[in-house]
Image (cartoon, helix red, strand yellow):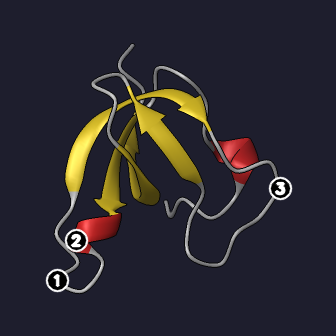
């Protein structure tokens, strides 16, 4: 599942994000969503989130629910 729809993403979800510094290479960082930063219901490049470790990036892929 891609990370373009805000309704699909919520705190506690495991996702792969692309940090601003990694946009050219496409390197993904895996983490757990702490909160959503994009207010729009859809974003073509991915919903921006903050991970629990403080990193901020756009969701490239939804990996799964930790439950």
Image height of 36 relative to 41, above or below: above
Q: Residue furthest top?
A: 67
Distance (Cα) linking label 2 and label 1: 5 Å
The residue where tag 2 is placed is 22
Q: Quadrant of the C terminus?
A: top left
Where disc 2 sits, the SS reads helix
Q: Residue furthest bottom?
A: 24
> In this view of the protein, which residue sits in the foreground, 48 or 63?
48
Tag shown at residue 58 = none
- The residue located at (32%, 39%) in the rendering is 55
Which mark is nearer the camera, 2 or 3? 2
User: Which residue carries the number 1 mark?
Assistant: 25
Along the line of sight, which residue is nearer the eye, 42 or 2?
A: 42
User: What is the CA distance from the residue labelled 2 to the residue labelled 3?
Assistant: 24 Å
**Mark toward the start of the polypeptide (2 vs 3):** 2
Side of 57 where 42 appears, left or right:
right
For the residues bearing labels 2 and 1, Cβ distance under 8 angstroms: yes
**x, y (%) of residue 51?**
38, 32
Q: Tag 3's secondary structure?
A: loop
Q: In x, y percent, where is residue 40?
A: 83, 56
Residue extending farthest to the front is 21
Does residue 49 sit above or below 1 in this rendering? above
Taking the spot 49% from the left edge, 60% from the top edge, the residue there is 1
Q: Residues within 10 Å of mark 1 (few under 14, many from 20)?
A: few
Residue 55 relative to residue 11: left or right: left
Residue count near mark 3 (Cα–Cα under 10 Å), binned few <14, some 14–19, many ≥20? few
Give the numbered dot on residue 41. Answer: 3
Q: In percent of the image, x 83 and y 56: which residue is there? A: 41
Residue 24 location, quadrant: bottom left
Tell me the residue at 55%/53% (across/down): 48
| 63 vs 17, nearest the viewer | 17
């Amino acid at each position: 599942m891609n990370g373009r729809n805000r309704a699909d993403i919520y705190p506690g979800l495991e996702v792969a994000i692309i940090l601003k510094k990694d946009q050219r290479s496409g390197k993904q960082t895996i983490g757990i969503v702490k909160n959503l930063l994009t207010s729009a219901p859809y974003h073509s490049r991915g919903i921006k989130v903050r991970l629990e470790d403080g990193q901020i990036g756009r969701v490239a892929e939804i990996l799964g629910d930790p439950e």
